[in-house]
Amino acid sequence: MVLVTSVRDYINRMLHDISGMKVLILDSQTVSNVSIVYSQSELLQKEVFLVEMIDSISVSKESMSHLKAVYFIRPTSENIQKLRYQLANPRFGEHHLFFSNLLKDTQIHILADSDEHEAVQQVQEFYADFVAGDPYHFTLNMASNHLYMLPAVVDPSGLQRYSDRVVDGIAAVFLALKRRPVIRYQRTSDTAKRIAQETAKLMYQHESGLFDFRRTESSPLLLVIDRRDDPVTPLLNQWTYQAMVHELIGLQDNKVDLRAIGSLSKDQQVEVVLSSEQDAFFKANMYENFGDIGMNIKRMVDDFQQVAKSNQNIQTVEDMARFVDNYPEYKKMQGNVSKHVTLVTEMSKLVEARKLMLVSQTEQDLACNGGQGAAYEAVTDLLNNESVSDMDRLRLVMLYALRYEKENPVQLMQLFNKLASRSPKYKPGLVQFLLKQAGVEKRSGDLFGNRDLMNIARNMARGLKGVENVYTQHQPLLFQTMESITRGRLRDVDYPFVGDHFQQGRPQEVVIFMVGGTTYEESRSVALQNATNSGIRFILGGTAVLNSKRFLMDLEEAQRIARSGSHMV
């Protein structure tokens, strides 16, 4: 709730204090920040009659002096240049400038010099430089997400821009929370270390006055970790509602694009919103497993049919008046039922067509249970199965390689060869590149629960007890990390502190930032952990929200650049 509320409050303050007809001008990133927490109808209530992108405003010459322009943009040099041009030829009656992060002094001078017509009424910093998709989950929606996998020498300026953007995003989150954290990072990741150190420099040196908030009993913790410590989670098929929608169809800024699905009728090929803030059914079911969702949707359909039946029984003027009063709610309910039925129906078709229950059972075994011989047989059978897609074959071999990298090199090579012969799309060396990036030598966490004695004991107990649901038995490594923090057992040697700011006692607030991106399985873990009332509130953030397709795309892009870089050296 906390991050969504912060961004909504910023937008409320922006729009509430400026009376009259307004145009809201956004950039390619702030449009996501706003649209995910504020609906079109809510903007209309605030007298916003036009929403424009700063790029298109630059092109247009039409005067609109009857409108007040409210800019909400990132303080990038490109945006400042566009503003300079627009202030030199003002098209609107007033200009109110709001930036989503810290402005440099030089940028303020540039804007002041450009405002010859005195069109600017105010300039403010509102720290909403992140996309708050869920109450305890945010993302930075970074396009060049693959850069974290590359050594700094391959693309130094690209990596610097990447780090700068992450530091900006983290800073905005803590300014919105009004906190200054103690900072730790994953020792085995150069990128995590660099980001942690640059964030500390900003908060404790360059902008120490801005971050000097009222001291709390214990400092919050910022923990910067690397996606490569857990490459398994983004490779798995998902079986809880939100995660499954993202894995099978795609979820971008809480919107699902159904236009690309050819099997749907024209009126169903639309973009639908899946937001826990705006949809009570989704809020109640986003973390439920697929079987339960089917039952719950049936109940929702039954309820709707009852309402529809009562609406057909109109006999008096009072009945008619009641129907008209309730009609907006009825239409909303109808749209909601249709949306969820369409999504679940479409996902059921994909599960059947791609034999995902079969594939997923082997995936879960690879992620959670031992037995190299049985795993090799199961993966070989699925590689030979004509119904299994190329992408599912690739993911199975990757999961097997991560699990049994050191156990039987001959059989691993046989799987590589079989994959190459069965899947024409298979990129030679992609599995090996994954092992180079996130193999056993590179990881610091106990990914498969077979290094740490406590984890081995826990897995044995789980094996004896049996699992409730074979498809959702996997727990991300993040779950162990949160458990270690809750118990005060996060080892300094694996997660060092930055500088001389150490944790006094147990933190009450923890922001875990994952370089390389998070998954909805992990955000579910965070929500469930917060629901246990352990006395610590966790917030999860990352550079992107991954599904297996995006994770493999980033991996391929990093491999391509690494190869061309090695030719150049």
Image: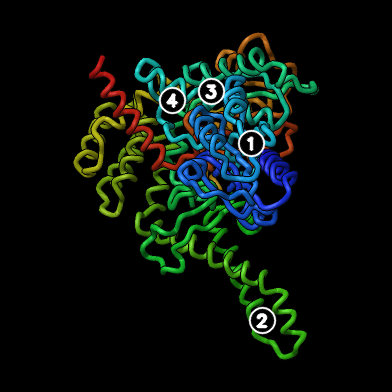
Foreground mark, 3 or 1?
1
Q: Which residue is mark 2?
A: 311
Q: Which amino acid type is shown beneath numbered disc 2?
A: Asn
Foreground mark, 2 or 1?
1
Q: Residue at x 68, y 81 (%)?
A: 310
Q: Which residue is mark 4?
A: 148
Question: Among all residues in the image, which is located at the extreme left?
Answer: 421
* Residue 388 falls left or right of residue 310: left
Q: Residue at x 45, y 48 (%)?
A: 247
Whether pointer 4 and pointer 2 mark residues with C-beta atoms closer than 8 Å, the reply is no
Q: Which residue is mark 1?
A: 97
> Alpha carbon of mark 3 to alpha carbon of mark 4: how far?
27 Å
Q: Quadrant of residue 33?
A: top right
Neighbours of disc 4 within 10 Å: few (<14), some (14-19), many (20+): many
Foreground mark, 3 or 2?
2
Secondary structure of residue under mark 2 = helix
Q: Which residue is mark 3?
A: 452
> Alpha carbon of mark 3 to alpha carbon of mark 2: how far?
61 Å
Q: Which amino acid type is shown beneath numbered disc 1?
A: Leu
> Alpha carbon of mark 2 to alpha carbon of mark 1: how far?
49 Å
User: Of marks 3 and 2, which one's residue comes earlier in the chain?
Assistant: 2
* Residue 373: assigned label: none
